[in-house]
Image (cartoon, rainbow, N blue to C red):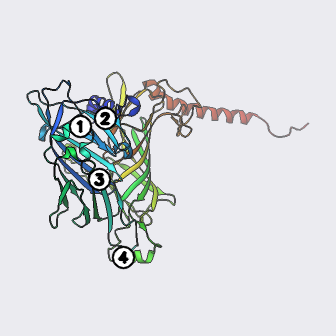
């Protein structure tokens, strides 16, 4: 079913690529495209936790029937989206009628990216509901910035503009809003301090983790409304500074091998003083390892994962565990529920605030679940861009997808805009070619028994979130003659060459002949 949606995904990916500044003309604020849609109500929710901050703004839009502007476009700004990257998604409608809509970047400044959203309202109504979901990395920071090893809790500080969902709107559009409510949800009800701007009043029920800000007057006359919340974070703040993924497709082995090189980082308060292993072990005996230490991380893998491995610079990480999904032999395959596999990674040492830990995980997947052949002999591969981890930001991602030898006519359809994309040439690689490898900046990778090298697609992206686990669709052509005979002929040629060398060496006399 995954590959049946290729047509829609390719179209959506093409629309997403249009968000890249290099693919279209970018306007500068306030010279943005006009719109005939006006907001009449706004409900905003912000969820704090981990190294990611989630916000959801629900707009009720009404079309101005007297406007001269044609089309169903609406422009809105996402603050900090230009610098911090992150995830932006627009959904129109309510309940079962919800559907994703096209969103394209049309402008930006130092702190805000402006998006044009293509609305698809019912023809019988001039009103529609639009939900704009945004996930931004590193919008909070620890306060205080340092804590001792024995600290029982850590505290984070969030500062944000309560009118951020109204960026990009004109003063006339803002004037239609009677009231703006912003709800901020913290991980726990323990809130140290809340600072509300002059234009808003704040309310928090006792024992509640939700803080509600309500505007005092017309928002059209308000400028930036910064609010600050100092709250308790119940656990360590995990973040990934760099993720290098290598995916290798093998038709002969019917296997897709995945390897992730991960640089894990504790983004919480830095350790104040020296680390004491004895104190840490004592706390572990009483099951109080402290909130500042990151001692374990769970990674959810596909259900069909097999042959997993995990190691670091020292060797195999024996403290980690791989839990494969349970199978019920009494049930038919069609009745079995596919539960994901889980890798419970426990580093060799606890990650205190400001510490990092580099490790490698790898596993195999059956190729038949991710590659299909379309009519015309073209293959379609659905490759996961990354393995998302809940509430964990990934600062820098690099993905290599190594296709089988002889693959040609390669096209790539990413599910979201990329920072860079490098595609191999459409022509087949020459035999024993010495084209630049991936390490040299090219698009060729060499592995065992290769004769021409594997065409490799290289992608990079900065500022990723746990919503960037979508699948990259790659189309390529692999002629049957190349698929079936290139490897055997290459192996036969090598063995024949060795056999010929041995025959010649046997017939050559290396000693000194007698007279």
Name the residue rendered at 48%, 57% in the picture.
Answer: 312
Residue 514: quadrant of the picture: top right
On screen, residue 123 versus residue 294, left or right, reads left
Q: Are marks 1 and 2 in contact (CB under 8 Å)?
A: yes
Tag shown at residue 170:
1
Residue 479: quadrant of the picture: top left
Q: How many marks?
A: 4
The Cα–Cα distance between marks 3 and 4, rounded to whole angstroms, is 36 Å
Q: Measured along the vertical axis of the image, is residue 124 above or below residue 47?
A: above
Q: Which of pointers 1 and 2 lies earlier in the amino acid sequence?
A: 2
The Cα–Cα distance between marks 1 and 2, rounded to whole angstroms, is 9 Å
The Cα–Cα distance between marks 1 and 3, rounded to whole angstroms, is 21 Å
Name the residue rendered at 38%, 34% in the picture.
Answer: 20
Tag shown at residue 283:
4
Task: Tell me where residue 432 appears, x and y as whole percent.
Answer: 58, 30
Front one among 107 and 130 = 107
Mark 4 or 2, which is nearer the eye?
2
Query: Which residue matches tag 3?
Result: 160
The Cα–Cα distance between marks 3 and 2, rounded to whole angstroms, is 22 Å
User: Badge 1: few (under 14), some or many (20 or more) residues near its Cα, within 10 Å?
Assistant: some
The Cα–Cα distance between marks 4 and 1, rounded to whole angstroms, is 56 Å
User: Badge 2: few (under 14), some or many (20 or more) residues near its Cα, within 10 Å?
Assistant: few
Q: Which of pointers 4 and 2 lies earlier in the amino acid sequence?
A: 2
Front one among 24 and 324 = 24
Where disc 3 sits, the SS reads strand
Query: Which residue matches tag 2?
Result: 30
């Amino acid at each position: 079913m995954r590959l049946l949606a290729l047509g829609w995904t390719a179209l959506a990916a093409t629309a997403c690529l249009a968000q890249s500044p290099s693919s279209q003309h970018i306007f500068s604020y306030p010279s943005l495209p006009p719109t005939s849609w006006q907001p009449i109500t706004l409900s905003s929710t912000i969820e704090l936790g981990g190294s990611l901050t989630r916000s959801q703004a629900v707009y009720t839009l009404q079309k101005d029937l007297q406007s001269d502007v044609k089309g169903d476009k609406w422009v809105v700004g996402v603050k900090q989206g230009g610098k911090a990257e992150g995830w932006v998604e627009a959904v129109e409608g309510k309940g079962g009628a919800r559907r994703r809509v096209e969103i394209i970047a049309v402008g930006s400044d130092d702190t805000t990216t402006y998006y044009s959203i293509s609305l698809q309202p019912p023809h019988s109504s001039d009103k529609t509901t639009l939900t704009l979901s945004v996930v931004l990395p590193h919008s909070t920071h620890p306060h205080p910035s340092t804590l001792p090893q024995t600290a029982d809790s850590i505290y984070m500080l969030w500062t944000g503009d309560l009118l951020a969902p109204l960026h990009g709107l004109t003063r006339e559009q803002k004037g239609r809003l009677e009231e703006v409510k912003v709800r901020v949800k913290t991980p726990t009800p323990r809130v140290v301090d809340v600072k509300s701007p002059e234009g808003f009043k704040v309310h928090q029920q006792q024992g509640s983790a939700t803080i509600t800000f309500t505007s005092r007057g017309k928002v059209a006359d308000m400028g930036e409304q910064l609010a600050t919340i100092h709250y308790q974070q119940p656990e360590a703040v995990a973040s990934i500074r760099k993720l290098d993924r290598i995916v290798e497709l093998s038709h002969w082995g019917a296997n897709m091998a995945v390897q992730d090189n991960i640089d894990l980082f504790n983004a919480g308060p830095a350790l104040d003083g020296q680390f004491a292993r004895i104190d840490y072990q004592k706390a572990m005996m009483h099951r109080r390892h402290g909130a500042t230490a990151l001692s374990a991380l769970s990674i959810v893998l596909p259900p069909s994962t097999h042959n997993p491995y995990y190691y670091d610079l020292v060797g195999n990480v024996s403290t980690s565990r791989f839990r494969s999904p349970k199978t019920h032999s009494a049930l038919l395959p069609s009745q079995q529920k596919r539960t994901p596999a889980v890798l419970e990674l426990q580093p060799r040492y606890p990650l205190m605030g400001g510490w990092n830990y580099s490790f490698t995980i790898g596993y195999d997947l059956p190729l038949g679940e991710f590659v299909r052949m379309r009519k015309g002999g073209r293959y379609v591969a659905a490759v996961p861009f990354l393995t998302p981890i809940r509430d964990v930001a990934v600062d820098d991602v690099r993905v290599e997808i190594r296709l089988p030898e002889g693959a040609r006519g390669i096209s790539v359809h990413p599910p979201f805009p990329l920072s860079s994309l490098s595609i191999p040439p459409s022509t087949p690689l020459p035999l024993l070619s010495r084209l630049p490898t991936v390490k040299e900046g090219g698009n060729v990778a060499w592995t065992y028994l290769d004769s021409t090298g594997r065409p490799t697609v290289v992608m990079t992206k900065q500022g990723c979130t746990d919503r960037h686990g979508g699948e990259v669709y790659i189309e390529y052509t692999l002629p049957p003659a190349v698929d079936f005979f290139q490897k055997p002929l290459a192996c036969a040629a090598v063995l024949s060459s060795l056999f010929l060398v041995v025959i010649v060496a046997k017939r050559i006399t290396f000693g000194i002949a007698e007279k």
